[in-house]
Amino acid sequence: MAWIRRSGNLLCALVVALAMMLLLGAGYGPVPALGRALAPAGGVWDSAGADPTAHDETLDLSGLSRPAKVTFSRDGYAAVDAASDRDLFVVQGYVTARFRIAQMDLARRLGSGRLSELNGPAQLESDRFELRLGLLRSARAEWAAYEPGSTVHEALTAYAEGVNAWLQRLGETGEWPVIYGLTGVRPQRWTPVDSLVVQKVFTQQMDFSTAPLTYELLRGSLGQKRTAEWFPHHAPTPQQPYDPGPYRTLPLDPVPTPDANAAAPTAAAAPASPEPAASPSATAQAAGQLLAELGQLPYAGRQERFNSNAWAVNGPAAGGGSMLAGDPHIGVSLPSSWFQITLRSPGYRVSGGSLPGAPGVVLGRNEHLSWSLTNASSQGTFYYKEKTSADRPGAYYWKGAWRQMEKVHYTIPVRGADPVGLDVDLTVHGPVMTMKKQTLAVTWMGNRRSDDFGAILRVNRARDHTEFRAALRNWRAPAMNFVYADDKGGIAAISPGTYPQFPAGTEPWRAMSGTGDYEMTGTIPFDAVPQVRNPPGHVLSSTNQRQVGEDYPYYLGTAGYFDPGHRQSVILDRLGEDGTLTPADFAALQNDVTDELAARLVPALLAALDKDGLNARQRAARDLLAAWDHTMDAGSPAASIWWTFLSGYLSDVFGPWWDAQDVPVDEDRSLELTSFPIPLREALEHWTLHDPDNEAFTPPGGVRRDAPAVMRSAFGRAVDDLADRLGPRPATWTWGKLHSREIVAITGAPGLGYGPYADGGDPWTVNAAGGDLTSDFGPSWRMIVRWTGPGRGSATAVYPGGQSENPASPWYTNLVARWRDGRQLPLPDPSGRSALDGAAWTVRPGG
């Protein structure tokens, strides 16, 4: 029967390969036309022979000191048992590469500025941007700082050996993934620096922000007063912090150094007077040009969307033990951002989601504790307006003197074209990102040393809260919220990271002068970052909201960096209900699509509508809203009415101001009103409920309006719009006809993703679904862990997709249906008490 199975796999792989050739022959998306098709060796046909799942096997692995074992569940989850910690990471690298090598290679190419080598000139702008930003420079410096023989040095070295063992086998068999067969390009050997680059790509997507540039555009168009009012430092609505205080005020820690992406302060030339300050319009133009460049990149090169949930309960709410739930929300893709694995060795007993390309487990559980992550959402990116002069090429003015920028040169290989050179300029603040109109340099915390791998490996081994907290002391970037539950009934949350502080009077949410008056004065000490343990209410929740109250003594970021708290309200309401909560309750909450913003604003809308003044269709739509439970179910027509109304309401209020003030949405897509900018959404909610006569409701130079008048107009147009799009009967306007979800292939290739399919949710429901009507954003992993006593824990998890990146594999999409339906699978016990039910590999030293 084995030959039948393998023949079927081969047939599937050949069909996929043929489809890929047809798609790539003319070029698509990020991959241009490839021209050549099949090569008799090392081409697509050879990639079709790779085993798409796993079967019982004995293999020899170089770098291994003693035999190890890998077992699989029937769904593809892997568990590694090794006799030493070093062997554990060798095998983890091999297993991950065997199922995800193309994903790993694409991630390191992205961060290292080498996508053009694989995909051709279409990726040059991406490569230039990444090399300017400097992930590769930072990764190299970080690797050089690890002592040989240290835990991280050994883990990264061993992991790379395992990856290279798989690359060597691919070189011998020619079973390369399709993208290499079509391009003729082969991945280079894996190095520890590559793992650090992959981790920094994750950091960039979580932490690199362009918000100060957006603020400059707004000041240049809306003006300072209105920008400050509509994009304030603190939100007008409370965000229900997980750490309510009281807070500690401690001396600042030094800023982490060195920064491999900043120039060392050089000996100054003779003191001189600086050039006149650049005009605000020049700063706005420079910001707009840089934002426009970013908007053209074929991927999200910055933090754009953050929605993640993690909560924990203990005491009576958990029946005397503790429970944790986590579902980080990022782009959903095939293959997934996570690779589920269980690791067992003398030093490790851990199970959960790993980052493909990196050792250890990023979120999950061990024998005594569990943890999940949400984005801390604080400001970690700052921009400096450098003083430069045409008379002093390559120089900038800092602390009373002109100084020379450092230069770094790169040669970018380009498939099908000549290599392209790139020079990167560095000031004391960081890399120069643009010199158009105004020289802007960026100071980004992701470019400073952060012992994230050391922190994660220590968390993987931690046995209690003391060790868990100590493990995170040197975590620097991205700033994250870690939510925790343990087998002793404890729960906690902490937000480690680098939080820069500045002199009094500084406005770090803007681009700051680079002449030396606005330098960082230090960072928040670890003992004063937001944190809480065993709160008296036995419940804590982290949903990207501001973690602290307004009396917190340090700067974290302005209102636009944090979630308004709609998910937080729903979660706290559910967790605060009487009775003992169960894992089934947690699963239901993870899949909840209640729109708390609708629950707050729909009553105001209904009050504004005069039922007698509505036509028959409008009355029917109003009645649907009046009977609605505020859930964004795919089958709900009221959900469609609400969404369409809200979009029109926000556009009716702010659109006239955007038009009159020429807000440059073409340069910064985050300012498009259809993206529901967070500060504007918060302002609109506050004005509607508490200040309905706010001047913003009256358009510039227009007839005076109040909130009810604008709501009535937006509602009427929403009904007309839905009738045009979905037919004349409001009862048929179901949300699923407007809203869908799609799980995209990481290559962008059409036909290799999943969907789109009709689905519920919206950006501010617990089960979040991006901002677009076709959403590719949401829970990238769902996990629930229950602790009932010392060493007694159970866990379930699921993510969209499967363990394999091979579209011909049954493990490519096998988990999607469970994820869609809100069902989870048991997360393998890291103690090894329960065996997996699939294939097994016996791994021997050698190779």
Image (cartoon, rainbow, N blue to C red):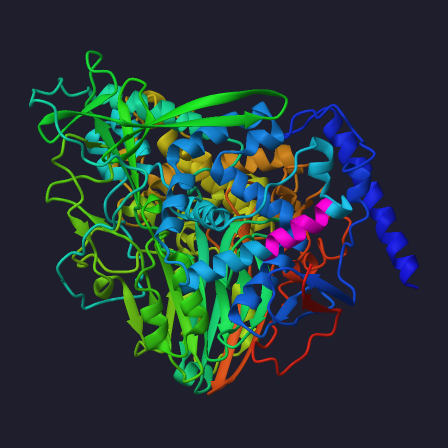
Q: Is residue 765 above or below residue 447?
A: below
Near-viewer residue (93 or 645):
93
What residue is at 44 percent from the left and 66 percent from the top? 457
Residue 367 among those drawn in magenta: no
Where residue 840 sits: x, y (%)? 73, 70
Q: Quadrant of the C terminus?
A: bottom right
Kindly indicate the quadrant of the structure image that contains residue 655: top left
Residue 164 among those drawn in magenta: yes
Kindly indicate the quadrant of the structure image that contains residue 518: top left
Q: Quadrant of the N terminus?
A: bottom right
Q: Is residue 229 left or right of residue 568?
A: left
The majority secondary structure of the magenta stretch comes to helix
- Residue 594 can be seen in this image: no
Where residue 807 sits: x, y (%)? 74, 47
Where residue 523 sits: x, y (%)? 21, 53
The magenta stretch is 162-171
What residue is at 20 percent from the left and 24 percent from the top? 396
Near-viewer residue (108 or 824):
108
Q: Is residue 650 left or right of residue 1?
A: left
| Total numbered labels | 0
Kindly indicate the quadrant of the structure image that contains residue 122: top right
Near-viewer residue (585 or 660):
585
Q: Is residue 380 left or right of residue 672?
A: left
Where residue 281 sits: x, y (%)? 24, 19
- Residue 524 can be seen in this image: yes
